[in-house]
Image: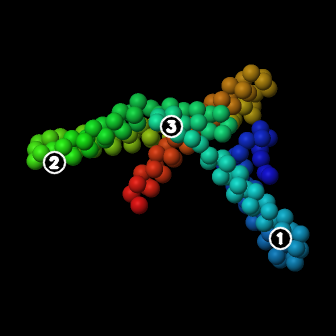
Amino acid sequence: MSENNNNQASTLGSAFQGIAGAVQRGIGQLTGSTKDIQDGTARKIDAEEENERSHAAGKLGPVTATAEGGTHVDSKDRQQGSWNQTIGSGKQFVGGMIGNESLKAQGRAQYDEGVQQETSGQASDLVDGYADRISGAIGGALSNDQVEQERYKRQHDGGKAAIRSVEKDLQKKVDADE
C-alpha cells in the first residue's frame, strides 16, 4: 500500500498516488499494456484506501482521536454552543407544550445563539487544526533533532484530529438533516 515515510495514512499522499495510478492506467490503455492498466488500477485502489484511513477518527463528546494518536478537545465555544442549542430546544419544546410564547421565543434565541457559538468554534478549531498540521509537517521535515521531530509530529497529529473533529460534527449535522 502507498503510505508516507512515517508509515501513516496521508490525505495529500493518497491524492498524489491516486493521480499517479490514473496516469499509469491511462498510459497502459494508450499503449495496450495490460500490466500498466492493472498496476495503475491497483495503485488507485490503494490510494483510495489510504485516503479512507487518513480520515478515520473517533469522537466521543468533545474529544476526538485519530488512528495516528492525535487528540483534540473541542473549543469552549463549540461545547457551549452545543449546550445552548440543547437548552434552547428544550425551552422551545416546553414553551410550545404549555403555550408560553415568551419561553418558546427565549428558547429559539438561545438555540440561535448556540448555533452561532458552535459555528464560530468550529471555524476556529478548523483554522488552528490546519495551521498545526501544516507547521507540524514543515517543522518536522526541516528539523534534524529527533525530539523536535516528535514534537512537530504531535503538533501535526493534533491538528489533524482538530480537523477531523469539525468534519465529524458537520457530517453528523448533514446526516441529521437527511
Mark 1 Cα within 10 Å, few/some/many (few <14, many 20+)?
many
> Mark 3 — residue?
60
Work out how far the residue at label 2 is from the one at label 3, CA to CA, in angstroms: 32 Å
Work out how far the residue at label 2 is from the one at label 1, CA to CA, in angstroms: 64 Å
Q: Is residue 176 visible?
A: yes
Secondary structure beneath dot 2 equals: helix
- The kind of residue on which mark 3 rests is Leu
Position of 25 with respect to 9 (left or right) is right
Quadrant housing residue 157? top right
Residue at left offset 40%, top offset 54%: 176
Residue at left offset 80%, top offset 69%: 25
Asked if the residue under mark 1 is in contact with the one under mark 3, i.e. CB atoms within 8 Å, the reply is no
> Mark 1 — residue?
37
Quadrant housing residue 57? top right
> Mark 2 — residue?
97
Secondary structure beneath dot 3 equals: strand
How far from the left and from the top, in percent, is residue 114?
31, 40
Residue at left offset 57%, top offset 41%: 58
- Disc 3 versus disc 1: nearer the observer: 3
Position of 27 with respect to 172 (left or right) is right
In the image shown, does 117 or 70 lie closer to the viewer? 70
- The kind of residue on which mark 1 rests is Ile
- The kind of residue on which mark 2 rests is Met
Quadrant housing residue 9? top right
Mark 3 Cα within 10 Å, few/some/many (few <14, many 20+)?
few
In the image shown, does 36 or 94 lie closer to the viewer? 94
